[in-house]
Amino acid sequence: MNYKTPVLVWLYMIATTVGEVFLFYSAKPDTFSVTVGIGVVAMVNSLIAAIFLMNIRKEPPVIQYMILAPLALVMVLILTLLFALAQ
């Protein structure tokens, strides 16, 4: 079994988590751009985990594109909640 890919994905997730914490503490935590930035990084992390750890990259292209629809809907949900809570 090839352990290179899971270890690299794990290191990527650790690096992005450190980046998220740095982003949170370097700026004002309640600003809209920090919240959106952390949400985008979390969405990319979930996409990377699905592609590499669930072997989605070996599936047919139709299945690969089906993953993008829920991710887009989750991003719309997050943005809607952020706009609703901002008022």
Image (spheres, rainbow, N blue to C red):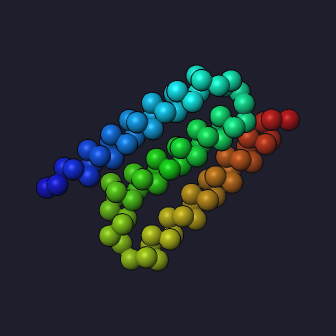
Q: Give me the residue at 37% from left, 65% from top.
A: 56
Q: Position of residue 69 (x, y in %)?
A: 58, 65
Frontmost residue, 44 versus 26 = 26
Q: Residue furthest left?
A: 1
In this rendering, the answer to whether 85 lies above or below 48 is above
Q: Give me the residue at 46% from left, 54% from top.
A: 47
In this rendering, the answer to whether 10 lies above or below 20 is below
Is residue 44 shown left or right of residue 58? right
Is residue 75 shown left or right of residue 50? right
Q: Give me the residue at 40% from left, 36% from top.
A: 15
Frontmost residue, 30 versus 15 = 15
Q: Give me the residue at 38% from left, 35% from top.
A: 14
Q: Position of residue 54 (x, y in %)?
A: 34, 58
- Which image quarter is the C terminus in? top right
Q: Position of residue 58 (x, y in %)?
A: 32, 70
Is residue 45 shown left or right of residue 1? right
Is residue 72 shown left or right of residue 41? right
Q: How many marks?
A: 0
- Which image quarter is the N terminus in? bottom left
Q: Position of residue 6 (x, y in %)?
A: 27, 48
Q: Residue furthest right?
A: 87
